[in-house]
Image (cartoon, rainbow, N blue to C red):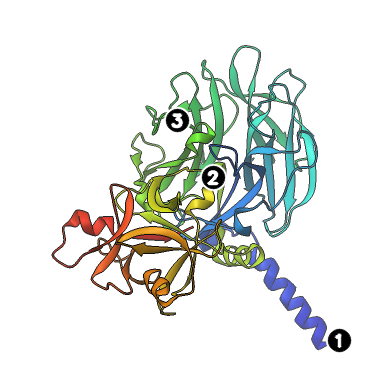
Amino acid sequence: MPSRRTLLTTAMASAVTAAFAVPTAAQAQSYAAYAMVYFKESPNLTDDSYALHLAVSGDGLEWTPLNQNQPVATPTQGMQGLRDPFVLRKQDGTFTVLATDLKGRVFNLDNQYIHVWDSADLRSFTGYRRVKLHDMATHSWAPTAFWDPTRNRYAVVYSANNGTRDVFMVNYTSDFVNMGAAEVFFDPGFNVLDGDVLTHNGAFYLAYKNIGNGNLYVARSATGQPNTFTTLTSGVRQGDAIEAPILVKSNAGNTFWLWGDSFGPANAVFYAWRSTDIGGNSWAVVDQRTFTAPISSKHAGIIPVTEAERAALVTRWGAPQWNRLKSYNFPDRYVRHADNIGRLDPFPMEPPADQQWRLRPGLADAAAVSFESVNYPGRFLRHSGYAIRLDPNDNTAQFAADATFTRTAGLADAAWASFRSYNFPDRYLRHAGYVLRIDPLNGSSSASDRQDATFRVTF
């Protein structure tokens, strides 16, 4: 008869396995969170990271970067760097991560290989390898994958040039080791880039970029087989240039998101659209006020996970030890310091750490909060002549009071936050002309003034 210890060990192992098992169709609603993989670039290269990064979200909109926004895995072969990572949950409940074999901003146009990792639960990454996809004199960019039930294989879709134009190629594999022969997957007669396939109700939906006009599109196939996709949409675009579309189904109902990020590291910004009909042609822009992507994140992959998986990933990799403050009425701007002045500037910014704050117990009141700079430890936001500066703590009572703020419900939106001065309690932290200060605010203040004093505490 097994001992009590053996039974307990077996039960614990079964519980861990169950937390990461693939839900059946009847259990599909157990997905209650999301995981994202990405790499990083910033305008002046200071935050570039051509390695695998990981974030999680409860609602698919507000993202928490894990491991302090540092890599969780790094390629050691080929160009020893990656772009365009993608994560797939396999049929057995484990995961595979695929990525382009590139490092930096010099693109290798002739690379037949991609990076691959295996993972039981995204808490560790094993079996690292480079796999060859084809023998053509072209690239293998932005690999994604989906399960093809008719072939009983995974379809690995990627961008390449077939000698005529840029198309999507596909290889079919059962193990991501033996990759099979390459064939054309999608060639609409013009150059395309960055394909992502979402299966829904037995159909297959392909998001892609038309290189010619720079727009993102969604196409549909009843079978998911090569050259069977028909474009449904008239094209969407935000910003000056966009790429890397991602199709995501919400865990909370019949809502779909189409994500894209702006082209080039100087514009490392995510955009999103929402639709209740993935098979239609109606995609509404998602207000940037409602979502926040990880700092410097680029060309991501997103999958649904269970709440147990999300919690396990936070436990394994750790949540950030810092925060950002996002403006309510200018949601593309964040509180930062520049030349020791408190400001509100657009993202991305250099250096990225200028917008990162450690929210300490208030220097004058532990129930309140003080904002310590991440890249200048010991320096805090404080008011002087009602203007906000970043100054070193001189350990005086005056400095402690000037650097302490009481967090309240947002003056423009109670789900956000506002910060009242500790020693001038009729004044709140706000921006005016994108410069931070404290001003008197109350219930009779204008809507614009209340919005200027409202922030989201995020990552």
Q: CA distance from mark 2 to mark 3?
A: 22 Å
Helix, strand or loop for disc 1: loop
Q: Residues within 10 Å of mark 1 (few under 14, many from 20)?
A: few
Which of marks 3 and 2 precedes in the sequence?
3
Q: Nearer the viewer, mark 3 or mark 1?
A: 3
Single out the mark in the foreground, 1 or 2.
2
- The reply to whether discs 3 and 1 touch (Cβ–Cβ < 8 Å) is no
Residue 87, position in %: x, y? 63, 46
Q: Going 41% across and 40% down the picture, which residue do you hit?
A: 278
Pick whichever, 347 or 398, lies toward us: 398
Where disc 3 sits, the SS reads strand
**Mark 2 or mark 3: which is in front?**
2
Whichever of callouts 3 and 1 sits on the residue coming sooner in the sequence is 1
Which amino acid is tagged 3?
Leu
Q: Is residue 455 visible?
A: yes
Q: Residue at x 53, y 52 (%)?
A: 353
- The residue beneath circle 1 is 1
Residue 55, image x, y percentages? 57, 54
- The residue indicated by pointer 3 is 216
Q: Quadrant of residue 196?
A: top right
Tell me whether circle 1 and circle 2 mark residues in contact (CB < 8 Å).
no
Which residue in the structure is indicated by mark 2? 296
In front here: 31 or 380? 380
Find the residue positioned furthest to the left. Answer: 444
The kind of secondary structure element at disc 2 is loop
> What amino acid is found at the position of numbered circle 2 in the picture?
Ser
Query: Looking at the image, is 107 positioned above or below residue 352?
Result: above
